[in-house]
Amino acid sequence: MPLRISRLFRAMALAAPLVWGAAAVVSTAPVAQAQGLFSPAILVNEKAITGYEIQQRERMLQVLNAPGDVRKLAREQLIDDRLRIQASQDAGIRPTTEEVLEGMDEFAGRANLTRDEFVRALEGSGVAEQTFRDFVLAGLSWRQLVQARFAGQSAVSDAEVDRALSSGGNGVGNVRVLLSEIIMPAPPPEAEAVRARAERISQLTSESAFSAEARRYSATASRDAGGRLPWQNITDLPPVLRPLVLALSPGQVTDPIPIPNAVALFQLRAIEESGFTPPEVTAVEYAAYYMPGGRSAETLARARVLASRVDRCDDLYGVAKGQPATVLDRGSLPPADIPTDIAMELSKLDPGEVSTALTRSDGQTLVFLMLCGRTNKISEDASRDDLVLGLRNQRLAGLADGYLAQLRADARISEQ
């Protein structure tokens, strides 16, 4: 692949989710060869996602060497895209044609390419121009909506900037929270009952009552402690969870948070501002080994044996040897790019520690999840203006992630 095209794909992979979102709302797609490719595959609040759109997103993810199951990832991303577009349109936000073209120019310019060069490179890899155009349209719409909706909540005080400067430019993160958690498996036959139970638990304000529910229903290792977690820096939590937690008062519980094959709830027990600002985590490396059998007693027993045999992520290569490549995923991603349920579990682990709280394939596959390590940002001299912009963008990103999570929780999503 020519060097300039390689830069193109690298630039696309590094694009910030807040700025561009991710969408491929195809309106003038090429004629599909496969019958039914343009039929609805997923409905999101009665808006269709077609098989062609999924195919296009899969191709883009393959070009970018995205880890994991690209078909599943494509579907999840497109669902979020629909929610972003719907929310923007409901707020009366519709970028002009000129703004979209400028956005396409700007995006292509990140790879030192013109818009036409960018489009030709994409088309050469099977990604249609309209897919790119609507990708930019959705990103612009979401950025304008976030700025309009949360502008009043993103202001940064002088005191916050002073603290950031005194801590070497790391900025936010000197808030610690004391949480309790419940993560309840919700395989399809039990999904409705679990959601109803989660709604009931979310109304609790008693720590003892929440802990009793955790001991009875939670699938995490913390269940024996009533779901109680130790003190955590707010920046260790997944970005989508931070604004939800910060909106709570002690004793309050988050609304149910849907995650694959499960529902999560968090209760705030205490919050404090410490004198220490931890370094910003720029990447988290983890490995996921997929074990058939879900949360059956036999599979959980095998997982416990495996946990006693492995001390680091490299050991899992030997475990997976001779099996299909899909049984082991290992990657290093920015915290904001990690699936929410995995990020929740990783936030509780030290390198070499394991979680078996999650499943995939409608509960039929257990996720043996191990944290390999975290990469911290190296602090450099930062100007006051740079810090203000950085802190504001971090706050906007957190608010945007929380808003998207709420949109998803309230959405009507159905497979066709």
Image: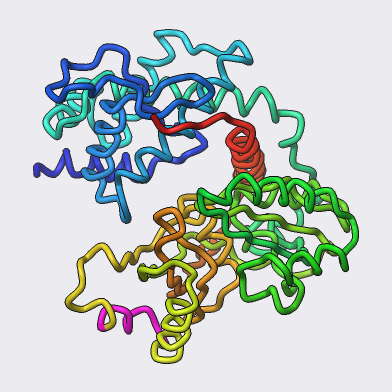
Picture residue at 69% right of the left edge, 60% below the top: 234
Picture residue at 23% right of the left edge, 21% below the top: 129
Q: Is residue 23 shown above or below 91?
A: below
Q: Residue furthest front?
A: 189
Q: Is residue 387 visible?
A: no
Q: Nearer the viewer, residue 3 or 165?
A: 3
Is residue 312 within the magenta segment? yes
Res. 76 image quadrant: top left
Q: Is residue 31 visible?
A: yes
Q: Position of residue 193 (x, y in %)?
A: 65, 48
Q: Please state if 229 lies on the left or on the right of 207 as rendered.
A: left
Q: Is residue 75 shown above or below 209?
A: above
Quadrant of image for the N terminus: top left
Picture residue at 64% right of the left edge, 59% below the top: 235
Q: Please state if 243 lies on the left or on the right of 318 as rendered.
A: right
Res. 348 image quadrant: bottom right
Q: Position of residue 302 (x, y in %)?
A: 41, 83
Q: Residue furthest bottom?
A: 309
Q: Nearer the viewer, residue 335 or 415?
A: 415
Q: Residue furthest top?
A: 97
Picture residue at 38% right of the left edge, 25% below the top: 49
The region drawn magenta spans 311-318
Q: Position of residue 413 (x, y in %)?
A: 51, 32
- Marker count (numbered): 0
Is residue 70 within the magenta segment? no
Q: Position of residue 167 (x, y in %)?
A: 69, 64
Q: Residue furthest right?
A: 206
Q: Nearer the viewer, residue 60 or 112?
A: 60
> How are the colours assigned in the image?
rainbow
Quadrant of image for the C terminus: top left
